[in-house]
Structures are given as C-alpha cells and as structure tokens.
Image (spheres, coloured by chain):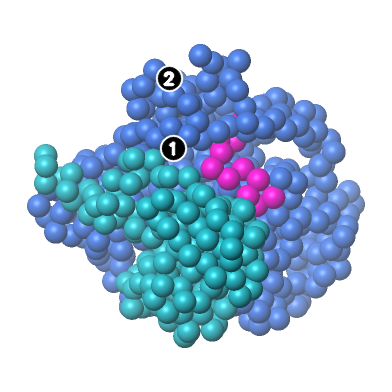
Chain colours: A blue, B cyan
Amino acid sequence: MDMTFAEKILSKYSNLKEIVPGQIVTVQPDHLLTHDNTAAIIQKIKPEINEYGIYSKSLPIIVLDHVIPASSEKTANNHKIIREFVKNNKIENFFDVGNGICHQLVIEKGLALPGKLLLGSDSHTCSYGAIAAFSSGIDRTEAASLLLTGETWLKVPKSIKIDLTGFLNPGVYSKDLILHIIGDISASGANYCSVEFHGNVKNLTIDDRFTIANMGIEMGAKNALFFYDEVTKKYLNQIGVTDSSYNPINADIGAKYYKELKYNLNEISPVVACPHTVDNVKSVEEVTNIDIQQCLIGTCTNGRFSDLKIAAEILKDKKIDSDVRLLILPASKDIFEKALNYGIIEILVKAGGVILPPGCGPCLGAHQGVLAPGERCLSTANRNFKGRMGCKEAEIYLASPATVAASALFGKITDPREVIDK
Amino acid sequence: MKIWRYGDNIDTDMLFPGKYVYTCSIAEEIKPHLLEDLDPSFSKNVKEGDIIIAGKNFGCGSSREQPVIGLKAVGIKTVIAISYARIFYRSAINQGLFLIECPEAVEAYSDGDKVEIDMENGKIFVGNKTFIFPKLPEQIIAIRDAGGLLEYTRQKLKKR
C-alpha cells in the first residue's frame, strides 16, 4: 500500500507494516527536546528518577533559551535545577544560556536528521520538517513520561499535500508564503494533519524551509515537512553530517491525501498577519502607514543569518525612525558570530538596532522588550496572540524580516519593495 | 452549574498568559491567572462542575499545560468545542481532563440552555436535543482510567 511520509515514518517507528490515519501507535523517538521547562518536568518525576533513573542520556536535548539570562530568582533557580539534573544524569546534549534557541540548535548541531523522529515540549518542535525529519510538540507531562520510558503514543495523522510552483519575486520571502497559506486555510486549517510540501522547492533554502515548517503549528499541523533533496544534502554536508548517518524517507507516489492544495509562488506578495490571530493576514498595502513603536527581528521563525543579512541590506547606512525601538535576536551563537564576521551586526547597531542575546527574547512576553498598553509591534515571530508580548492592550503584527526592517526606517508598516527597489 | 461560552481560536495566551509560564506551574499558582486576558471574571466566579462551550481550535498555540492543570483544578467538568488544537487535546488526556469534540452540540447551544453530559454513553443533552460524541480509543481510556499519564507511566514502571 502506498503511504504518505507520516504513515511511512510512523509505520517504521512502530514496527507495523501497514497503518492508517486515525490509528494509535507506540513510538520511541530519537530525541526529546525540552528547554527552560525541564525544571518543571523533572519536578513531576523526582521520586521516579531516583528509583528508576532516566530512560537514556542520549534521548534528551536540553536548551536554556526561553528566559535567558535569568530574569528573576525563580527563573535563575530553574536554570540551576536543570544544570544539576544535566550533570547528575550525564545528559549528552545540553546547551546552556547563550548558545541559542532550541529549534535552531537542534538543526544546526545535526540532531534532527532526515527520516528521524523527534518530540519536544514546545509547540514549534515541528520546525525539523525543514530537514525532512518528523517532529511534533507535546506537553510537559508527556515529556516527563518520555524521560522515564522513552516511548509514547501517536495518532497517525491524515496528510495534506501542498504543491508549489513558480518562484518568489524580489521582496517576497518564505515568511510571506507561509503567512499567505495560513491566511488562506485558517489557523485550524491543518489541525491534526501532517503537511507535506511538494513541487518546486529547490529554490527554498533550509532557512526558508525552517521558517515554513516552524509555522506549521500556526495552522494546527502535527508536523510540516520538506522532503530530502540536494538542498538538504548540501546543508547537512556543510554542518559536517555525512550522508551515511541518516536514511531519508519519501512519500510513495500513490499516497492518499486528505487535501491537496496548490500555490504559485509568483503570485505571493508581502503580507502582514494582523492582531490577534495568525490567520488574520492582509497584503502589506492594506496596512501600510499603521504606526509602530517596536520592531523585532529574530526568534526561531526568522533569526537566521539570511534574515539578519536581508535586514542589514535594507538598513545599511540608514537610521531607523526615532520613535521606533528595533530589537534584534540572532537565533544562535553561531549565527551571531557569523553576522559579526560579516559586518552585519555593525550595520544593524549603527542603524539603531539593539542586539539581544541568542534566545527567545520578548517573543513570549516573559522579559526583554515587553510592550506597553496601546503600543504596536511589528515582529518576525510566529504568534500575534493577544497578550503574547506581555500586554493584552498591545498589538502584534507579523511579517518577513524585510518588511520589519523597511518599516523600522519609517516608524510605520512599509512595503519592503519600496525600499529594495530604490 | 454555569456554562462559560467562548468563541473560536481561544489560544494558550488567553487561557494562561505567557508571562507567568516560568513562574507558575502548580495549581494554586495557576488558578488566579486562568483566562486572565480573555475573561477576568472567570477565575473569580468559576465553580466545580461548570462547563466551557467554545468554537473552533480551542487551545491553539503553545505547548502550555498550565491551562489544563488550572481548568482541572477549578473543577471544570468538561469543555465542549467544535475542534481542539492537538497539543492542548493531548495535554488534557495527560491530565485527565475530559474534552468533547462535538460541533453539533456547540451549534445547538443558546444562552440559558440546560446542558448535561453522560460520559459513559457518550451523550450530551443540550436543551431538549441529544448529541452523541465518539468513544475514545482504548489506549487513551487506559490513560484516563489510570488517573492521567504520569500515573499510567508509574504503573507501567512498577510492572517492569
């Protein structure tokens, strides 16, 4: 029987020859990602860890990224508890404060590979579909259970096939594409489904694919995936992963899809997700001139080298509007270093940008750049929920790094093509 | 028993603001902030046995189990929604909070209607209408009967 990617990989991991959507299967993931929430997770199972020990020291990937450096005694103590747990249990993959955002590190360090299965106690765990892995978010309790047993259940999802044709025009980016799709099918349009991207994807870099897969959850998807190809292979070689260390999985030609959608990349234009849902997507022209007080370039969605480079190209030898704060968050230490070496950080700082440490920063409203009532933020992040950035009377708009950089120059939402063309 | 009626896309930030995520993790810390940015009257007035009726995509957004722990702790009997976001749905199973996905019942409900649930037989009574919701798969019932995922895991570990 021909199978989709999700059916094929879940059949492999559950040792069942044939599986169908809706079926519940038991799987043992290759890795379990947890972050600052590790403290709360291990707290739940302290006696069990003492009695039985953890399942394996190679299963967890633990990253301190959500509230870093610690913002209070409580968060500092959480970090301390996690460091002690890591030492006592000889956890193999631990990344302390300053290394970067968990999802960036999982990909950058070669921990997500084609054909692998990863789960994580963070909703944006679906990002690793960028590298042809199956990955999905779970909660803290399930992460606790996995730490002890190494296994959990998954429902085999239905699959959606998204077929891409054409090429993105100048000034239009993968962020515009994924926001366009979410606006089209809604924030629940892919609920419980596995989303596969097919067609003309060869011009979408790993960074582009990362942005798209990352936002799979914003349409409700269980996972979002780009198949292994030359782009994936080249990226993995660059980060020092040899071809023999993984086995990519492809969907079968006759696989059955619950839905098939088509998008022509030539027809996509810059868009903005308006408050307070990610599917409230409007063309940039419709929202031009809305004034903004804060701009954010970074997060697991758009904090990569290529994103910072696009922003620097727009902001080179210019100054941002005096009524705007521009916050910049490289997604990892390696990206930060590379941006420093290429003079990108210098350009961004000279333009008026404030560089924050590689981490989640103000995206989740816990610290660093919380908004005041009545303020508007234009952000490259993935969520614009009410209260998301710490204040329910503030508004969050989402866009590509180019749109955010162009808008920082004028203090109002601006079509990046106006700046890029000139 | 009160019915709390909410709309579509009730996200995890509305259910429990992100700014408290790394400072509140146990029920007593969570309760006062439950639904804080959506309905400030909720945490003050919610009572044991109350029901939430909501629209599409309830619980969308982050992997955030505080809302589930909080709703369970304040005694919410169930949520009836048109649909749920998957991490929230899983989380509810893990905490032993029962969610019902039944678009027909949500659509049939108008303010003031009496709502009753027959969990064993999978029936919801809204006003004078009856709706049937599907039975959970066996594996999920086993987690429920154990009293949530951690209890289920503990029992499994003891048997090894």
Residue type at tag 2: Glu
Q: Chain of mark 2?
A: A
How many neighbours does mark 1 have within 10 angstroms: few (below 14), some (14-19), or many (20 or more)?
some
Residue type at tag 1: Lys
Measured from the top left, where is residue B103 in percent x and y?
Answer: 61, 53
Q: Total number of numbered labels?
A: 2
Residue at image position (25%, 61%) is: A44
In front: A151, or A38?
A151
- Return the residue at label 2: A18
Measured from the top left, where is residue A289 in percent x and y?
Answer: 86, 68
- Return the residue at label 1: A155
Q: Chain of mark 1?
A: A
Tag 2 secondary structure = loop
Residue B11 among magenta residues: no
Residue at image position (41%, 45%) is: B136
| Residues shaded magenta | A186-196
